[in-house]
Image (spheres, rainbow, N blue to C red):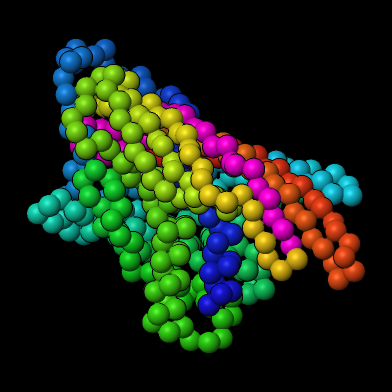
Amino acid sequence: MKKLIWLLLITVTFVGCGKENKNSDNTSGKDSTTAENRIVPSSIDKAAKYDLKYKFKKGDRYDYALTTITNTNQTVSSDTLVNIDVIQTIKYKFAIDILSVSSDKIADVSINIGSIDLKASYNGQTVTYNSNMVLPDDEKMQYLEYETLKNSTYKAKINDKGQILNIYFLDKIIERMAAIQKYEQKLTDQEKAGVAENLSALLIKPLTQHLFRILPEKEVAIDSSWQYRYPSSLATFQIENIASFRLANVFEIDNNKIAEFSAALNIKASGDNTYTEKNIHYYFDKPVVTGSGTIRFNIDTGQLVNSNTTTRIETQGIVEATDDKGKTEKASRKDITVSTNIIEII
């Protein structure tokens, strides 16, 4: 059980806001440049108010591609100075089927991760992964997250404002993860529930939330702004994420009204900045997290058109360890990670 959860913890995905990408607009699966050229000079009432919401209908299907580009620089200083640079691009393809919609507009949806492609460079060494690859058992652990999620289906409850209320139907994913890790003991129902909770909170829900941007509760007009706050954790700190949005423009493509809103991300970090385990002491500076970006939403069809989101996370800390002879060793580490998440209709 502990092994399962520990390996899961190292695959945390941070969901943030991002920067504009005017070349990724696609309202109907057509070429994005063509979609840009189809923008109609707007005769829309600039003072009009809009109730932005997802218009789920039973039987509808949405296909999206999520591309995550991550650049990480890590500096470790002890007796020597070590710099590590990682550039990683992951591409997911999702098929979303609306199974049912309740009277209060909560949709039960089935989400299939059809394919995963990875290209990464670690200090110049190239690594590639494709979910169509058949890996030997001893190599699957190297790609645990992707081998667990590839060709998998799970379900979610989502309201018409894009809030994910529940992630469920994870049993088969958990069984696959346990098999890859050669976890010999059969998990009890309580253990399965614990793993499902961690799997949902740390990996699947953040991944899914990219596909359903949370919309404002009240009607908005051009230049209206709103905020969405949500908790997370980083190192020893409790994080309050503050995502701020502004409706920047409304225009038309193919007779559909498209809302374009900008986004920004900041955080408030609280909690103890130290942690001790046996003879090892950890000291952390407060993390610095920022983001900015643009999202487009089809008002008429009630569907995310695209988004391009980038988050910058800077963390640093010191580790001190004392051996049996009383000798103390110290090392410092600094990480800067910039992640861009691009969503497009396919």
Q: Image height check: is 318 above or below 112?
A: above
- Relative to 55, 72 lies left or right: right
Percent coordinates x, y for residue 225 in the rendering: 30, 26
Percent coordinates x, y for residue 77 in the rendering: 82, 46
Question: Principal SS element in the magenta part?
Answer: strand
Q: Is residue 229 magenta?
A: no
Q: Is residue 305 magenta?
A: yes
Residue located 48% across and 38% down the image: 267
- Relative to 45, 157 lies left or right: right
Residue located 45% across and 65% down the image: 198
Residue located 68% across and 66% down the image: 277
Q: Image height check: is 139 above or below 51?
A: below
- Relative to 233, 129 lies left or right: right
- Relative to 198, 156 lies left or right: left
Q: Nearer the viewer, residue 35 or 123?
A: 123
Image quadrant assignment for residue 141: bottom right
- For residue 284, say whether it is visible: yes
